[in-house]
């Protein structure tokens, strides 16, 4: 068993760290104050992602991406997670479902998305369909060689940074025919209802959209009719690992800030870390981060070693659940160690505290991850989590 990073992995981690320090961290406060990354700052950041060689981190060389292993991706994602206000999302990761497109679709959507010339957002959630995507009411009907889409989508992240939308709809309203459609912006008969404010001030918006007989060409179906959920499942695994890595990176930054403060802050004639009440908080943070990091890299390594798809799915859920909950606990303790300073918006720990909450909700809530883990134990026994593959 070798748990050392290779020279290439160390180099990628250092590059990810430097990119955050030089390009993203200086944008944190303006993003928080402005509510999102100001439009005029976006082109320079996009160019920086290309200049730093971070375009297409999650795609194969065959499609124009960097062809990184999952461990190599995670060493970068861990660094990106340190940054507040969702600025990690400035480094685009085109949805893996685009790989299932026809050659023409790959040429039109996947390749330009990898190079940062285009960007897509993903619209699954609806007012009546969150954890249970079978309740989706957006309907796609084929009439005279055109797809007609009708329905409402919520929480569409990065809508205002995207030029196309991947819309999840049920063909003919049949929940057994979940399917994905590529919708170019601007499009007919679609309303951007609003982009509400959220607890975090994220780099881009989260929009609500209404389709009312939106007409798109027949060849805008991605994959096959009925394959929508299967293609999204692959995206979930990748997204859950990314969230775990971001949550870990965020919690590590908060813990380091708290640790430094505990050394330099004096009260009652001694550094506050000399009070066991403070040191025990730091100890609990370190132990939880230690466990989370070990789990994160094990699951990434399993993917690279070709573990079977259902096992990876099972482990990705457990990982996302654990890392997002650890991050919540660690950042809460870090804020406590910082006292009143931790509650100030200019302090990154305050922003991380707000940012990290959504990691227990999106890409499957903590409860849904427990449903997956529980189902796996029921089907295959505890060995899925306690054994080696
Ligand atoms: C900031 C943000 C960005 C998002 N971005 C996107 C995006 O880009 N695209 C997109 O499509 N969606 C996006 N989402 C939506 C997100 O994926 C959903 O919010 C999430 O899946 C939960 O759905 P819901 O909010 O409808 O909650 P519900 O599904 O209504 O759940 C409410 C509560 O019930 C619990 N619950 C539900 N079912 C079960 C069960 N079987 N067992 C136990 N408990 C259960 C949940 O855990 C939760 O606590 C985003 C959400 C947020 C907040």
Image (spheres, rainbow, N blue to C red):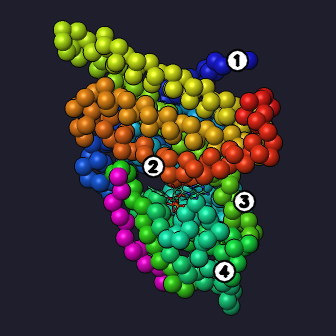
The yes-or-no answer for disc 2 within 8 Å of ligand 1 is: yes
Residue 138 visible? The answer is: yes
As displayed, is residue 251 above or below residue 261?
below
Q: Mark 1 or 4, which is nearer the eye?
A: 4
Position of residue 388 measured from the top left corner of the image (x, y, whole percent) = 78, 28
Mark 1: secondary structure: loop
Judge left or right: residue 182 versus residue 277: right
* Residue at the spot 28% in from the left edge and 27% down from the top edge: 338
Q: Which label was assigned to residue 358?
A: 2
Q: Residues within 10 Å of mark 2 (few under 14, many from 20)?
A: some
Residue 16 at what x, y percent from top left? 48, 32
Badge 3 density bin: few <14, some 14–19, many ≥20, Cα 10 Å? few
Of mark 3 and mark 2, the one earlier in the sequence is 3
Marks 4 and 1: in contact by CB < 8 Å? Answer: no
Nearest the viewer among 286 and 118 is: 286
* Residue 5, picture quadrant: top right
249 sits left or right of 225 in the view:
left
At horizontal 74% and vertical 30% (from top left) the residue drawn is: 386
**Mark 4 secondary-structure assignment:** loop
- Looking at the image, which residue is at 67% across and 34% down? 299
Residue at which label 4 appears: 173
The first of marks 2 and 1 along the sequence is 1
Query: Which numbered disc flags the more N-terminal residue, 4 or 3?
Result: 4
């Amino acid at each position: 068993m070798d748990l050392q990073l290779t020279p290439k992995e160390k180099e990628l981690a250092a590059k990810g760290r430097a990119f955050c320090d030089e390009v993203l961290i200086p944008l944190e406060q303006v993003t928080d104050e402005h509510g999102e990354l100001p439009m005029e700052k976006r082109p320079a950041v996009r160019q920086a992602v290309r200049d730093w060689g971070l375009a297409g981190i999650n795609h194969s060389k065959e499609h124009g991406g960097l062809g990184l292993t999952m461990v190599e991706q995670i060493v970068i994602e861990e660094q990106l997670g340190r940054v507040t206000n969702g600025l990690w999302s400035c480094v685009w990761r085109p949805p893996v479902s685009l790989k299932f497109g026809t050659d023409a679709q790959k040429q039109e959507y996947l390749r330009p998305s990898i190079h940062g010339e285009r960007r897509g957002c993903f619209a699954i959630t609806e007012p009546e369909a969150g954890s249970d995507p079978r309740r989706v009411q957006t309907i796609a009907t084929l009439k005279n060689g055109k797809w007609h889409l009708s329905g409402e989508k919520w929480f569409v992240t990065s809508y205002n940074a995207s030029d196309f939308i991947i819309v999840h709809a049920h063909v003919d309203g049949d929940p057994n025919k979940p399917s994905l459609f590529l919708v170019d912006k601007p499009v007919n008969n679609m309303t951007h209802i609003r982009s509400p404010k959220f607890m975090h001030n994220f780099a881009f918006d989260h929009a609500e959209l209404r389709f009312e007989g939106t007409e798109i060409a027949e060849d805008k179906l991605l994959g096959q009719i009925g394959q929508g959920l299967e293609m999204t499942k692959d995206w979930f695994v990748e997204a859950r690992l990314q969230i775990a890595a971001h949550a870990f990176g965020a919690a590590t930054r908060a813990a380091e800030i708290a640790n430094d403060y505990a050394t330099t802050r004096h009260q009652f004639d001694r550094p506050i870390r000399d009070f066991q009440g403070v040191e025990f908080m730091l100890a609990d943070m370190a132990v939880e981060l230690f466990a989370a990091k070990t789990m994160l890299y094990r699951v990434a390594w399993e993917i690279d070693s070709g573990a079977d798809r259902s096992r990876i799915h099972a482990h990705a859920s457990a990982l996302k659940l654990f890392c997002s909950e650890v991050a919540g606990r660690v950042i809460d303790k870090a804020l406590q160690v910082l006292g009143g300073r931790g509650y100030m918006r200019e302090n990154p720990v305050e922003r991380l505290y707000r940012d990290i909450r959504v990691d227990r909700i999106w890409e499957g809530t903590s409860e849904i991850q427990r449903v997956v883990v529980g189902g796996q134990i029921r089907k295959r026994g505890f060995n899925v989590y306690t054994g080696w593959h």
